[in-house]
Amino acid sequence: MLAIVRKEETMTLAERHNVHTSGSGPRAMVFAHGFGCDQNMWRFVAPAFEDQYRVVLFDHIGAGGSDLSAYDSATYASLDGYAQDVIDLCRELGVRQGVFVGHSVSAMIGVLAAKRAPELFDQLVLVGPSPRYIDEDGYVGGFSEAQILELLEFLDSNHMGWSQAMAPVIMGNADRPELGEELTNSFCRTDPEIAKRFARATFLSDNRDDLNGFVGDTLVLQCSEDVIAPQAVGEYVHSKLPNSRLIVMSATGHCPNLSAPAETIAAMKTFV
Amino acid sequence: MSDRGDPPGALPGDENSEIEDLTDLFENAPCGYLSATPDGRITRANRTLSGWLGYPHGELVGRRFPDLLNIAGKIYYETHFAPLLRMQGFFNEVALDLLGKGGQAHPVLVNAVERRDAEGAVRFTRITLFNAADRRRYERDLLDARRAAEQATADLHALNQTLESRVAEGVAERLRLEESLRQAQKMEAVGQLTGGVAHDFNNLLTVILGGLEMVGRQLENLPRGPATERIQRAASMAAHGAERAATLTARLLAFARRQPLDPKPVEPNRLVTGLADLLQRTLGETIALETVSGAGLWRTMVDPGELENALVNLAVNARDAMPSGGRLTIETSNAYLDEDYVADIPEPVPPGQYVLIAVTDTGTGMDKQTLERVFEPFFTTKEVGKGTGLGLSQVYGFVRQSGGHIRIYSELGQGTTIKIYLPRSLIGAAAVADLRKEAPAHGGSETILVVEDHEDLRNYSTGVLRELGYDVLEAANGHSALEMLQTHNDVDLLFTDVVLPEGMDGRRLSDEATRRRPGIKVLFTTGYTRNAIVHNGRLDAGVQLITKPFSFAELAAKVRAILDT
C-alpha cells in the first residue's frame, strides 16, 4: 500500500504577516507599524510591555517580512484592506479586549478595525495619527494637495531612497536578490512598487468621518515638530474622540517610538 | 616639532596649521559635510554644501536637515531614513534631492552615521552628501534604456506573435486556394468528361428521336389497325425514353457548366409549376413542397434551363438542411428594388422592377460566419464527398449573369430564405414559346447546305429537310463545305455543326461562308457548346442555334424562322 502524504501549503495569517509574539499577560498588546519601515519600529518600546501583556508584532502585507505575494493592489488601495487584515489576524490570534498601538497611518487603521470589530480592543494608543494629510476648508492636515501630488509624482517618476538597492532593479538582476539584500537597510526592506502604492493609500486617505462615533478608550501621542502629523492634527483627532486623552511629547519628529522610546513608554503606561 | 610626532608623510607645521589644514579639508572637501543633533538640527555645514545650495556660509546652521529636502524626500526621511538611522546607527547611499535656496534640485547621495559617547548616547549625527547629478542621470538613462529594451522586446514579441499568426493565416489561405484549385481542376476534368459524353449522347439521341419521329410520320400514312397501334405505342414509348435521356444529358451539361446561357422571356410561375414534380422528387417524401404564385407576375429574361437548375440546386440544399423533414416554399411576386435598397448592395444592381422568386426552408439555418461565405465557390458545410460547394455559387453566378440580385436570410434553428430577384422583361414570352413548340412544320424550297461529320446525324438532318421540301446539299467537314459553296451559288442557309473535324470548326466555316457569300444565313447546331460560338456563357448576338437533340418539328420551325427573317 502506498500512502500519499500531501504537504499542507496553506499559510496562516500569522505567517503571512510575519507575526512575532512575546511576553505574557491576560491581554494582548498589538503593535502596528506605519508607512515606512516594519515591526522593527517597535523594537525599543514593545519589550517594556512583555511583563504584563502578550505582545504581538506584525508586518502589514507588502512591508518587512510579510508575504509579498499576498499583496493585492486593489485590496490595499485604501486603508480598509489593511484594517480588515488587522481584524482577521487578531481573530486568528484570539485577541479580545486587547490594546492596539498604531503608529502613523496605522493609528487610523486601528480606529477602522476597532469600529468594525469592537470585541478586539478595549484601548487604542495612536502615535502620530492623521485622518487626513491634506489641508482642506479650515482643516489643517500639514500638506497642501500640490505637495502630496508632488510626492506621488516624484515616486512615480523616480526611485526614492537607496541607490544601491536600485541596482538590481536597474540592472534587471531580479534573479540575484542578494544584491539588494545585504544592504544598509536590513531594517527597512521595501518593495519600491508597493511603497508607492502604500504612499498613495496613506497620503490620499481621508478618514475624518471614521472618527465620528468612535467611543473607545484612546490615547493620542503627539510629537513636537512632527512634519508628517502636525500638532493641529493630533488636537483634531483628540477633539473628535470623546473618550480620548492627548499627550504632547517633547520628542520631535514623527517616530518617538525610535527617537524617544523612554518618553513613549512612560506616556503609554499612564494610559494602559 | 610636537612631541607626539607628525604622522608619516604629514606636512611639518604647528598645531594651528594642522587645524587650518583640517578646516580647509572640511570646508572645501569635494562633498557636502554637516553635523546635526540627534533630532536632525544642523550644527555645522561646510562651504561646499552651502555653495551648492546657494546659502551664505553659516546660514544652514539651526535648520533641520529634512527641511533641505524636497517634499518627497522630507516625507521619506521622516518615515524611512530617520528611523533607519536610529535603528542601525547609520545609513548609506540614500538617493535624495536637496533644494537650493532658489528652489533648484540637487540630486545627492546621502550617508549618515551617529556618533556616540562612551555611555552610548548619541552626541551628533555626521551626514555626508555626494553630488549625484551625473549618477542620477546615468541611472535615469539606464532605466530609460531598460524600458526601451523592454518595450522593444515586447514589440518584437508582439510582432513575432502576429507574424506567426500571419504566416499561419497565409499558409491556411494557400492551402485553401490549393484545395480550391484541386477541386476546380477536378470539376474541370469531370466537366470535360461529362460534356464529351453528353455530346456523343446528343448526336445519338437526335438520330434516335429523328428515327422514331419518322416512324410516327410514316405510321400516319398507313391504314390503322392493331399492328400499327402496337408500333405506335412502342415508338412513343421509345420516344419518351429518349426524351428522358435527353433531359438527363441536358442536366449533365448544366452540371458541367457547358451550357450556354440563352436568355428568353420566361414566365416564372409557369416554370416553377412545371418544375414542381421534379422538385418534389428531389426533396423526398418527408418534405412538403408548397408553391405560392404571385398574381399578375411579370416575365423575366433568363435562361429557363439555368433557372430550373438554380431552383433544383436550392431544393437540394434545403433538403440537406432538413434531415428530419420540413417544408419548402417557393413564392413568386413582383418586386421593386429602390435606390436605397440597391445602395446597400455590394454588387452593382440597378434599381427598378424585378421578379422575386423566394425559396424558404424550415431547416437548420446557418450562422453568421457560414452566411458570409455561402456564395464562395467550393464553400460547403457538407461532408467531404457529399457536396461540391458549387451549388449556391452557381446560383449566384447565374443570377448575377442574368442581371439579377440574390439575398439570403437565415437564422439558426429557424430556416433559410433565399430571394432571387430577376430583372423584369417587357418582351412577350408567348411568341418565343410558340416558335419552339407550336409552330407548324412548314417547309420550303430554299437550298440548304448541311455540314455534319456524324454520318447518321447528317442523314437524319438532310432527310428531315428534304422531307420538308428543301433542296439539300451536304458536306462532312468545313473544307468540302466551302468547295460546295464555290460551285453552288444558290445556297440560302448554312446548317452546320459547331464542332467539325480537320481544323475548321463551324464558327470559322460560318465566317468564311459569310465573307464569300454575304447574305447567307447560318444555323448552328451542337450537343456540346463551349467556345466556338459561345462567349462568357452567352450566345453571340445574332447567332442562331438549335441544340441537339432536336425534333423534326423543332428543326422545321427553326429553319423556317431563320429563312423568313
Image (cartoon, coloured by chain):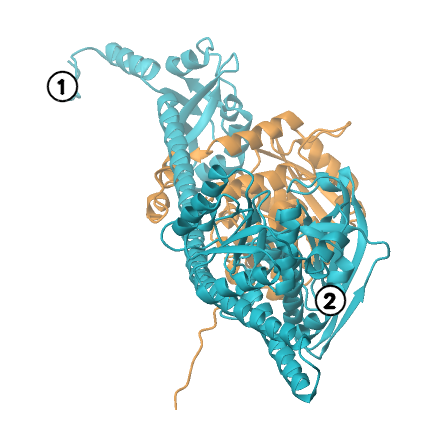
Q: Nearer the viewer, residue B235 or A164?
A: B235
Disc sitting over residue B9 in the figure:
1
Give how far across and how far down residue B266 sits, in percent. Answer: 73, 54
> Which residue extends farthest top?
B56
Task: Pinpoint the chain carrying mark 1.
Answer: B
Q: Quadrant of residue B430?
A: bottom right
Please give left or right for residue A116 compared with residue B494 in the image: right
What residue is shown with label 2? Answer: B274
Q: Are marks 1 and 2 in contact (CB under 8 Å)?
A: no
What's the distance in space between the residues labelled 1 and 2, CA to CA?
126 Å
> Which residue extends farthest right?
B295
Q: Which chain is cyan?
A: B
Give how far across and how far down residue B36 sits, in percent. Answer: 45, 25
Q: Amino acid at mark 1?
A: Gly
Please give left or right for residue B141 compared with residue A120 in the image: left
Q: Amino acid at mark 2?
A: Gly
